[in-house]
Amino acid sequence: MFMGFLNFATAEELIKEKQVQVIMGMETWEEAALVADIGSRARVPVLSFVTVPFTPALVRLGWPFLVQMVTDDSEQMNCIAAIVQSFNWRRSVVVIYEEDIHGSDSRKLTLLSKALKNVGSDIDYHLVLPPFSDLSNPQQSINKELSKLENTTKSRVFIFLQSSLPLTNLLFSEAKKMSFMQKDSVWIIADTTRSLLNSVSPPAVSAMEGTLGINPYYSENSSSFKHFHEQFQQNFQLDYPEEDNTEPGIHALRAYDSIMTITQAIVKSAGKMNSSKMLESILSSNFTGLSGELRFEEGRLSSYQKFSIVNFGNQENNNLGFWSSELGFSDSPSTMKKLAGFAEVLRPGDPKRILREGVILADLYARPMNIAVPGIVSFKEFLSPDKKRFTGFCISVYEEVKKILEDDHIYSLPSTTEFHQYNGSYNDLVESVHNETFDAAVGDITITTERWDQVEFTVPFIESGLLIVVPVKPRTSKAWLFLKPFTMKMWVATGAIFFYTMFIVWFLEQRSNPEFSGPWKEQLGNVLWFTFSTLFFAHREKIKSNYTRTVIVVWLFVVLILIESYAASLTSMLTFSRLQSPVRDIEWIKTTNAIVGCDGAAFVRKYLEEDELFEPGNIIDIGSESEFQTAFKNGRIQAAVLEVPHAKVFVNKHCKQYAYGDGSFTRRFGGLGFVSSSEWNSFHSFHSLISPSYLLHQKKKNILSFKKVLH
């Protein structure tokens, strides 16, 4: 039996007195929970059209005879997140929904939040509307909530999650009056609310022009649907002659499929079936109904589903394409051919404003795009600010990627772009984009955690980090270079071993060996020559004592080690021109309170003070490459801490005077990237194109040639 609202007594009466074996209907969780509880006690299957705000395991435990004729909301939330991602509305969104005292909204919010995080977005604000039946003055209450929303968040992407029909009518009418339906806003309507729109009042329909809706996809080409469609329209017009829209919605199709499911279960039993077998037969259903594939998993319809994306117009709706979890967006539900880009999409508040190719044509088109460029730069190779024109590697990257985007029709930036020189620190520059003084910033801006929390960054186009640069001087050639392989202590030790060996050989051989006898001068000469000759060739003197032979073996082993070490060290000195620097490492700098220089406009000083615990007085801010050279020469600084790209340029240009310092001091950061505020989604399209591999593919060698200098 199909019923709308049931109270406890009515449901019990149907089961006990009418002997019904299946109950279907219920459009709210309050009704479904009540009837499902009674049905579970009486072991009567209950088919409901509402999503249960609990996990399948809890549902089976509390209401084992409840069958949900709806799919899990996770697929729909993933579809919404995919739309947000495809249009690059990445920063944050606002979720609007009518509060449900039974908690059906909590699971949807959890699923939506998870899906948005998976695409790099999040929920910035929850606009929770009280139940319409609880409002004494609905219009005043809605205006109050919308005013609060306007003063709390700057996000213009709204996801309308769920609401009753009266509240939907009122909300959109008031939202239009309060300028929430302007061309810079985006509205996405979930299926729960979208299914009610056939009954929305004309003022609300007009206000909803340009919004995006999500519909569960169902085929309208089958013979069974055409037959149902004809019969439905005839009966609907007879029952509701005042209604203009006679199209069946998803709820009507699922109601019909529910009846077909029950009918097939009865046919299977040949009229002989109890309630338990009826439930088992219903859950084992597997056929194609009007609303799609009918197959149950864990007491509800299978979660795999296709959705159609609809753009609402004033006169008619525009079907943009389709989405499924397996293949994403497609332009055909039958072939599931990949969708290259959305067709023209109407925007709220402006019938002439459209979206193309899956990305937004900027909504601030009435004014130029204001881009800030750092005015205080240390290395002109990256950025050379000028009153009339800006040049440098960063500007070249921006211009080339912009050209690729426009040539390939991926994105169209505003026709007018104005660059403004910003004579402040890089942190202040990022803050000026955050507070919307500028729309974006282009330059050698390092991505740090603190900055990432404030603004949007493109992917990095160059690695970043910190390196120590120290002054060096080449080791000049000297006449006594042959003495350098060994230290003074080593030479003294070698001489001591030499004379000790000479004395032992003489002592052991002078009595029995005539080679070492005679006048003392002759004995001294022979033993000295004997010991020294072993360094280079075999000696001619014969050894008589075995003890002497043992001493000579040890001596020859020592000689072998000394010769090999000396040869290797001397060869290295003669082959490589070594550089000398008084600065050892980062710990030596801190211990000796050596003075270091850094880029005063960058984040380096703050990092050295807070993370490396440098004394503030030991850090000097330096503003240009030439100032670094001057400071090194006059002794103001003993080392410089530079960002990796700057250090590479500096050392490569002055490789005879400077070199990298302590190799263990290498701090990595997020790279160099461009900055934009959250509302300028244009810069997000740089993400896939700004990488060197893509530029190389596009043969933009004039940019890549500069990167070779850095390495």
Image (cartoon, helix red, strand yellow):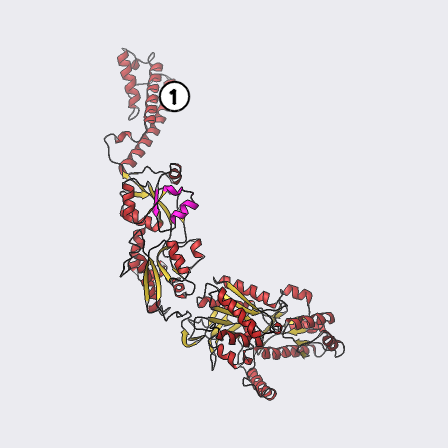
Residue 345 in view: yes
Q: Position of residue 666 (x, y in %)?
A: 39, 46
Q: Nearer the viewer, residue 379 or 563?
A: 379
The magenta stretch spans residue 608: yes
Q: Residue at x 29, y 20 (%)?
A: 530
- Picture quadrant where residue 395 is located: bottom left
Label 1 Cα neighbours within 10 Å, binned few <14 / some 14-19 / many ≥20: few
Q: Position of residue 664 (x, y in %)?
A: 40, 43
Residue 162 in view: no
Q: Nearer the viewer, residue 95 or 425?
A: 425
Q: Residue at x 37, y 24 (%)?
A: 554
Q: Label 1 belongs to which residue? A: 550
Report the amino acid beneath label 1: Thr
Q: Residue at x 68, y 64 (%)?
A: 61
**SS at mark 1 in the image:** helix
Q: Nearer the viewer, residue 279 or 603?
A: 603
Query: Which residue sits furthest left?
Result: 479
Q: Position of residue 285 (x, y in %)?
A: 63, 74
The magenta stretch spans residue 503: no
The correct choice, above or below, for 164 with respect to 567 in the image is below
What span is in magenta?
A: 596-618
